[in-house]
């Protein structure tokens, strides 16, 4: 079965190369090839040695910018006390680095990590999810660590702070648009 697939692949590769390539092993003079990449592309297109998936270059992509999303901006501002390991607007997630939390237990070190998932662009309580992870490491043997996802009041407080800040930013944006 694998041999058949390999033979078919080789056959189609040769077919494409022989039909689309004009002698791929020909001698080329460096003086005939333009130095500028745009000129090389233009020359190759004129000679029929290239292809374009779209001929209409006037249309650009659709971009949503993080600066226009109040929920995103509010999350960044509320979590500015800790560094981020990942802040992906297009992925809809913010992950903080581990930071020290208050430890009630004297024999272990406690660190927290906050993850904010954006489920909607609207400022709603179900539009974001705040997840808290706790890492407890032994003070003597620091390699022994346990990481757990915890349900804590900290998560609710952060979520509420983000929603309040987002509502405030939305109100400011609306005022600026009216002026």
Image (cartoon, helix red, strand yellow):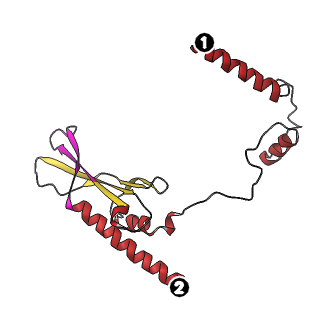
Q: Is residue 1 visible?
A: yes
For label 2, the crowd category at 10 Å Cα-Cα, with few meaning under 14, some 14 to 19 and many 20 or more, is few
Residue 177: percent from left, percent from top: 53, 81
Residue under numbered circle 1? 3
Q: Is residue 93 left or right of residue 9?
A: left
In this view, the residue in front, 29 or 49, is 49
When the figure is inspected, residue 3 is found, relative to residue 118, above or below; the finding is above
Q: Which residues are magenta?
A: 132-153
When the figure is inspected, residue 146 is found, relative to residue 156, above or below; the finding is above
Q: Under tag 2, what secondary structure?
A: helix
Q: Is residue 131 left or right of residue 41?
A: left
> Going 73% across and 44% down the picture, which residue do you hit?
53
Instruction: Specify the quadrant that holds the N terminus.
Output: top right
Choose the circle earlier in sequence order: 1 or 2: 1
How many numbered circles does the render carry? 2
In this view, the residue in front, 28 or 130, is 130
> Going 25% across and 53% down the picture, which residue do you hit?
112
Residue 135: percent from left, percent from top: 23, 47
Asked whether residue 58 is drawn in magenta, I would say no
Residue under numbered circle 2? 178
Residue 78: percent from left, percent from top: 34, 67
Q: Under tag 1, what secondary structure?
A: helix
């Amino acid at each position: 079965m694998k041999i058949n697939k390999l033979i078919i692949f080789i056959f189609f590769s040769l077919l494409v190369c022989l039909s689309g390539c004009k002698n791929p092993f020909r001698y080329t003079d460096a003086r005939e090839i333009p130095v500028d990449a745009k000129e090389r592309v233009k020359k190759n297109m004129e000679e029929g040695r290239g292809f374009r998936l779209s001929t209409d270059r006037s249309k650009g992509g659709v971009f949503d910018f993080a600066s226009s999303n109040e929920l995103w901006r509010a999350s960044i501002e509320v979590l500015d006390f800790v560094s981020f390991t990942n802040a992906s607007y297009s992925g809809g997630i913010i992950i903080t680095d581990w930071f020290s939390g208050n430890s009630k237990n004297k024999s272990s070190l406690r660190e927290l990590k906050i993850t904010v998932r954006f489920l909607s662009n609207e400022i709603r309580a179900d539009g974001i999810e705040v997840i808290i992870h706790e890492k407890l490491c032994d003070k003597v043997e620091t390699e022994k660590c346990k990481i757990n996802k915890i349900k804590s009041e900290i998560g609710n407080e952060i979520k509420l702070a983000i929603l309040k800040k987002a509502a405030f930013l939305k109100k400011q944006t609306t005022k600026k648009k009216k002026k």
